[in-house]
Image (cartoon, coloured by chain):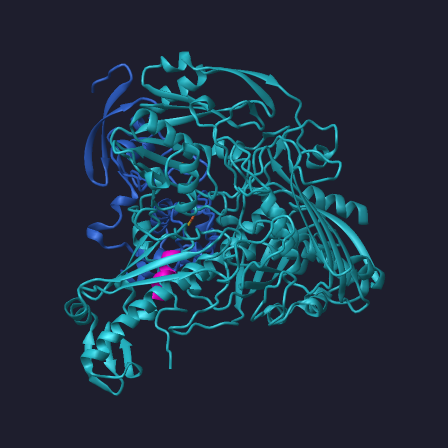
Chain colours: A cyan, B blue
């Protein structure tokens, strides 16, 4: 039984027609009556005290309606993390000090952008410049300029420590003793950006009744509402964040941003709608990019390649405020421990304040950095021991049912199958085995592999989702979810699930999403939780409707519930298709005979329902999730030994995502991640000098175009399945595949020309230098 | 033609409708389409000619509306994404775009649709290289371009089947 009609099918996007016709309204497209333009004044100093701000001339510019500075705010701080250990550390507008170039100092609302820019130029800020520090390792040393006091619980003699994570198990020293071979390496990952096409944008409209309506390009409305309400001193019920289409986010639109706060406060001051759209240059120079990281790995193995001990130290450059720095040093521990069995492990991670712009999550949030380090080193170890890259990974890969050190169970784990399938598919062993002496001439090819694991829907916040599904009079349904489609297709898969549970054509499922006032609370679309957490909530809500329909049908048809069959908006008695009722009839009957019950279903879900709150960022103690995805990726490259240029000829991703709810979307996620990784590997780098961005445009920060398309293939390793009426455990597909591929590329370059790279990006200069050395 | 200090009245034909508009001399075609005419389907990803999301057809040729001053388009014919599907029917290019899953966030989509419509008009059976040449200036961060490449080939086929 259980033929699936919608789940697992290549269903086209619900929002597709809106998007191909230009009808989709994004935040940048919203134009309200009387809307003002907001602009932000930013600090030209990396570190300075603010002595005075004079706005009098700015206020005189015709068309200017309001100018705000830190003095106009309540001085309530906010942060990506707000816990007792890590209290909020950032004012929405600078009060006393600025800590990076681009920090927001004042904002203006005016009738047009010319007036707003003119006013910005007339605001006089007097600064007292302070010594600044930009390199995290320099910033840690006592004597470095203090950006914030070091975390009180970090007892070492270090400064500017925003946070620390320490974890481990077993006896790492004993493990190294036991090892036949030990090596330690240091890897560095560079600064790169999300590159979403829709800029950061917010429209805020403060109404006469005291309600603040907000549209903002984000990754979920509920966290924005909470933080806006807190910093503005409003009750949450006075802030309504509404849906607009989102033109990409990739981790860069989660937290509260100052432009959101300023648009809101300016609207409150002027009683007119205010729009702030960041320019691309502002996004490059002053907004949050990903996390550059230094990873030191020491690994001990037995002769046969079995890992016996691993010790890690990471240093993250968090910029002028904590941002997500203390989260990334916690998460990378997870990215280290999830794929391989490590009997003894020690981990230490520091998040360090520097006078750079703040950092945020970026697709993978630490996974690319950690997997690049571990997988590169594993290949070096394998070569040293004379073991193949495939065998060493198979030897250490986790298997189904294994318990992780945090107490999580990996459940069905397809990692070994991913490695085996990809090796076979790519003819890895034969290609890898071609010796370098056989590779002659200017262009040389190589192949490399990497693996990674990614957790979905983790309890980093008290994450959960609720969904409402309601029947309409005509038997169609409406789905209410707080989840936001940022391009990944969440609305479509939620509709697929509801359509499947209720056996109703997908066209008859309408979604109403992402409105804090009218839709139920949702996890938000980050840490890869939507398909699993919100999806199961949708399944439960539809199940609730199904049960109600079933009860009424059983009464009316005088049948046993077990004998009822749902098909195409009707309920039948098994074997007697002539005895049936349509959903339309059932709704009418329910209203008539159940005191007006119009058939509304509720559903909710949270990963691991019994866990108290969330794991400790300091010690990693506490459960995370029951949802681990695994993958292996290979890269085939061609190195031009004269120019040092590398081309990615082919990328293959073998992945255990549980099962794909929509294969078309899964492929889209994989292709997008391979392309992003290709950019990170070869093309993209935010260049900074003393806190200043040197390449603030897409002309100078090159992202892949269609001319850099990667030949990307996919292999599904199916480990879970969907059954109507039962909880499911599909896994994440939106972040994990940007990671292993980076290491696979590095390993492929080594296989091609014998140059081992310890830092990203893999530039021609580094490769030529490497070639020079081994000549 | 009337000129004031800052504004100039120009005629503009957009999606076959003619408008008379007072525009500021420094206003771009993109601003006028989006702000004066409310045609927000044309997107601004950068405003400086680097991403292709503001592409429209000017006298049938794809141009970047963020780099074109509105006053330069006086009495010219412009087509935007809003003018593509007549009476709600999607064009074969739009159909193919959906079918092949070439849309994710959709922010690059209007520009991609117009540029590929233009390409297919000039070249009913484009090669991979032709597609790279025509779409090389259009950034898309979501799709990795694989499904965009597929969709252009598919749209070409749909177009050929239709004629
Ligand atoms: S907005 Fe015109 S090219 Fe980016
Ligand atoms: S679909 Fe998002 S940028 Fe192309």
The vertical placement of A669 against A761, above or below, is below
Question: Residue A94: image x %, image y %?
Answer: 51, 26
- Picture residue at 65% right of the left edge, 53% below the top: A333
Q: How many marks?
A: 0
- Picture residue at 38% right of the left edge, 29% below the top: A265
Question: Residue A578: image x %, image y %?
Answer: 18, 84
Of A273 and B97, which appears nearest the observer? Answer: A273
Residues shaded magenta: A490-499
Of B143 and B105, which appears nearest the observer? Answer: B105
Residue A278 visible in image: no
The vertical placement of A453 against A27, above or below, is below
Q: Residue furthest left?
A: A592
Question: Residue A480: image x %, image y %?
Answer: 31, 56
- Picture residue at 60% right of the left edge, 47% below the top: A328
- Picture residue at 25% right of the left edge, 63% below the top: A508
- Examine the residues drawn in magenta and state their main secondary structure: helix
Of B110 and A24, which appears nearest the observer? Answer: A24
Question: For residue A110: magenta?
Answer: no
């Amino acid at each position: 039984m259980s033929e699936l009609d919608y789940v697992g099918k290549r269903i086209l996007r619900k929002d597709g027609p809106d998007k191909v016709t230009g009808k989709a309204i994004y935040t940048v497209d919203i134009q309200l009556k009387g809307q003002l333009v907001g602009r932000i004044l930013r600090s030209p100093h990396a570190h300075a005290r603010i002595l005075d701000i004079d706005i009098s001339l700015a206020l005189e510019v015709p068309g200017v309606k309001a100018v705000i500075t830190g003095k106009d705010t309540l001085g309530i701080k906010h942060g990506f993390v707000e816990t007792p250990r890590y209290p909020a550390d950032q004012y929405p507008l600078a009060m006393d000090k600025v800590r990076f170039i681009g920090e927001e100092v004042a904002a203006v609302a005016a009738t047009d952008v010319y007036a707003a820019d003119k006013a910005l130029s007339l605001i006089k800020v007097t600064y007292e410049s302070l010594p600044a520090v930009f390199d995290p390792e320099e910033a840690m040393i006592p004597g470095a300029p203090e950006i914030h006091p070091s975390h009180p619980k970090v007892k070492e003699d270090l400064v500017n420590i925003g946070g620390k994570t320490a974890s481990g198990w077993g006896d790492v020293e004993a493990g190294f003793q036991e090892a036949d071979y030990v090596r330690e390496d240091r890897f560095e990952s560079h600064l790169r950006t999300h590159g979403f096409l829709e800029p950061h944008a917010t429209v805020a409209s403060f109404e006469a009744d005291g309600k603040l309506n907000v549209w903002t390009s984000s990754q979920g409305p509920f966290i924005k509402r909470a933080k806006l309400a807190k910093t503005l001193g409003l009750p949450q019920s006075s802030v309504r964040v509404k849906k607009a289409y989102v033109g990409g986010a990739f981790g860069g639109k989660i937290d509260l941003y100052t432009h959101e706060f300023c648009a809101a406060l300016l609207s409150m001051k002027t009683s007119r709608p205010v729009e702030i759209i960041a320019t691309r240059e502002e996004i490059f120079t002053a907004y949050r990019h990903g996390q550059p990281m230094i990873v030191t790995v020491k690994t001990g193995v037995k002769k046969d390649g079995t890992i016996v001990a691993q010790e890690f130290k990471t240093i993250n450059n968090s910029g002028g405020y904590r941002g997500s720095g203390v989260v990334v040093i916690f998460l990378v521990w997870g990215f280290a421990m999830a794929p391989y069995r490590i009997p003894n492990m020690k981990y230490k991670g520091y998040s360090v304040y520097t006078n750079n712009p703040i950092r945020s999550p970026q697709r993978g949030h630490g996974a690319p950095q950690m997997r690049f380090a571990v997988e590169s080193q594993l290949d070096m170890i394998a070569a040293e021991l004379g073991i193949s890259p495939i065998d060493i990974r198979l030897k250490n890969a986790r298997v189904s049912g294994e318990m992780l050190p945090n107490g999580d169970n990996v459940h069905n784990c397809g990692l070994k199958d991913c490695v085996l399938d990809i090796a076979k598919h790519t003819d890895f062993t034969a290609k890898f085995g071609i010796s370098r002496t056989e590779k002659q001439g200017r262009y040389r090819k190589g192949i490399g592999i990497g693996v990674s694991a990614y957790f979905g829907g983790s309890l980093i916040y008290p994450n959960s989702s609720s969904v409402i599904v309601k029947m309409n009079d005509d038997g169609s349904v409406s789905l209410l979810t707080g989840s936001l489609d940022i391009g990944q297709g969440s609305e479509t898969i939620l509709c697929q699930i509801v359509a499947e549970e209720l056996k109703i054509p997908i066209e008859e499922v309408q979604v109403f999403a992402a409105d804090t006032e009218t839709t139920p609370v949702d996890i938000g679309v980050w840490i890869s939780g939507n398909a699993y957490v919100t999806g199961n909530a949708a399944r439960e809500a539809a199940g609730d409707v199904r049960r109600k329909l079933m009860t009424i049908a059983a009464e009316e048809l005088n049948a046993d519930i077990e004998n009822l069959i749902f098909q195409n908006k009707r309920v039948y008695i098994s074997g007697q298709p002539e005895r049936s009722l349509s959903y339309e009839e059932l709704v009418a009957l329910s209203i008539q005979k159940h005191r007006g019950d119009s058939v509304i279903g509720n559903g909710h879900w949270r990963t691991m329902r019994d866990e108290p709150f969330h794991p400790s960022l300091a010690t990693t103690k506490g459960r995370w999730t029951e949802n681990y995805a695994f993958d292996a990726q290979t890269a085939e490259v061609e190195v031009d030994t004269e120019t040092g240029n590398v081309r990615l000829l082919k990328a293959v991703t073998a992945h255990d995502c549980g099962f794909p709810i929509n294969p078309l979307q899964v492929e889209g996620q994989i292709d997008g991640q391979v392309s992003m990784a290709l950019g990170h590997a070869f093309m993209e780098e935010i260049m900074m000098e003393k806190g200043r961005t040197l390449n603030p445009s897409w002309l100078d920060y090159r992202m892949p175009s269609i001319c850099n398309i990667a030949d990307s293939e996919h292999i599904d390793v199916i480990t879970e399945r969907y059954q109507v009426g039962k909880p499911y455990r599909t896994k994440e597909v939106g972040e994990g595949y940007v990671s292993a591929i980076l290491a696979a590329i590095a390993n492929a370059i080594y296989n091609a020309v014998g140059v081992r790279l310890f830092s990203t990006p893999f530039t021609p200069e580094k490769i030529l230098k490497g070639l020079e050395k081994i000549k | 033609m009337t000129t004031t200090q800052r504004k100039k009245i120009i005629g503009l034909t957009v999606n076959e409708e003619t408008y008379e508009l007072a525009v500021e001399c420094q206003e771009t075609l993109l601003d006028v389409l989006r702000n004066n005419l409310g045609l927000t389907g044309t997107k601004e990803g950068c405003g400086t000619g680097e991403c292709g999301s503001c592409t429209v057809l000017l006298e049938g040729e794809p141009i970047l509306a963020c780099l074109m001053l509105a006053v330069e388009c006086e009495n010219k014919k412009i087509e935007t994404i809003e003018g593509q599907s007549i009476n709600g029917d999607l064009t074969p290019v739009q159909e193919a775009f959906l079918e092949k899953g070439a849309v994710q966030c959709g922010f690059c989509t209007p520009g991609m649709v117009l540029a590929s419509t233009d390409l297919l008009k000039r070249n009913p059976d484009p090669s991979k290289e032709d597609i790279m040449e025509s779409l090389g200036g259009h950034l898309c961060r979501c799709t990795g371009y694989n499904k965009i490449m597929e969709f252009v080939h598919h749209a070409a086929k749909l177009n050929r089947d239709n004629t």
